[in-house]
Image (cartoon, rainbow, N blue to C red):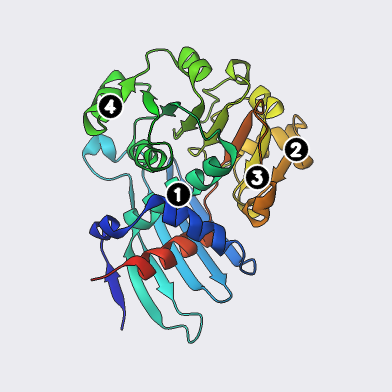
Amino acid sequence: MTVMIPFEAEAQLNWLDLTDALAEGHKTPKGTVEDVFLYRDDNTLLNRSAWIKGMGLAVKCATVFPGNPAKGKPMIAGAVNLFSDQDGALEAILDFALVTKWKTAGDSLLAARRLARPDSRNILIVGAGTVGRSLWQAYSAAFPMAQFNVWNRSADGAERFVRDCPGVTIAKDLETAVRQADIVTSATMSTHPLIQGAWFQPGQHIDLIGAYRPDMREVDDIALQRARIFVDSYDTTLDHIGELKIPLANGNIQAGDVLSDFYDLAKFERQTSDITLFKNGGGAHLDLMTSRYILESYTP
């Protein structure tokens, strides 16, 4: 019997439990992942598939139309199909927004629980969109004593964000806010670096989510050169996302500068004065792990 899992199922989920499930998922055999990206102007069609032995298969199909919010429509649409590893049967159809929200923010939170200082008290969210709201929820679970600030290109967007997220304050100047933060988590659609490495301070953790295309970047080369770099997956970041693909191609960083991915979590360590930087690239294997966690947590 196929289970239909709506967005409202998130009331049964827990951010810390999800990060533990993702960590366990990376102890399984490395999955087969295949991504297909189709582009037209600023719009994107993503088809992401993953198969992990013992966990099953997931196929996620999504459209990303950045111009939709201005028309009062959602930017992203899609669905996730979860199949049995035993007989290929369709086990669940999950709300796309549910899986994407929890996968994306959970991905970053797993890294932050390993790389950020546990006593982090000032968290800056760059970008006041839907993902920024998810990051506020996720980081609040792991850093309950932290003060959150949000910086956004438009003041209207930042004001809507603080109305939706109690206790968050608006950062007026990005450079000042970055310099003062213990954790910077960025989720923008920028194709040109917004955040400069010259602003970084010892002990900070930088979490980059927004860039997902070969032409997209949120930080400059100096940021990468000053930080210890980690990714969720070598396979879905180095050759696919401009954040790393461009500086690697230009010789401004080397592949060896990317120290580890989630398949070797033991290397996700920090010293007090380290600047750590994590590139969240997503990937269908993470959608599969998240979907499996959701199905196992869900009670109709």
Q: Secondary structure at mark 1?
A: helix
The residue to which callout 3 is attached is 268
State whether residue 217 appears in this view. no
The residue to which callout 1 is attached is 106
Estimate the x, y position of residue 263 in percent, counting from the top left: 65, 57
Between residues 10 and 271, which one lies in front from this camera angle? 271
C-alpha distance separating marks 1 and 2: 24 Å
Task: Name the amino acid type tagged 1.
Answer: Gly
Tell me if mark 4 has few (under 14), some (14-19) or many (20+) residues whose alpha carbon lies within 10 angstroms of its own.
Answer: few
Sequence-first disc among 1 and 3 = 1
Between residues 147 and 101, which one lies in front from this camera angle? 147
Q: Secondary structure at mark 2?
A: helix
C-alpha distance separating marks 2 and 4: 37 Å
Task: Name the amino acid type tagged 2.
Answer: Asp
Estimate the x, y position of residue 204 in percent, counting from the top left: 57, 26
- Between circles 4 and 1, the one closer to the viewer is 4
Sequence-first disc among 2 and 3 = 2
- Between circles 2 and 3, the one closer to the viewer is 3
Task: Name the amino acid type tagged 3.
Answer: Phe
* Residue that appears at 35% across and 66% down: 297
Q: Quadrant of the C terminus?
A: bottom left
128 vs 137: above or below: above
The residue to which callout 4 is attached is 167
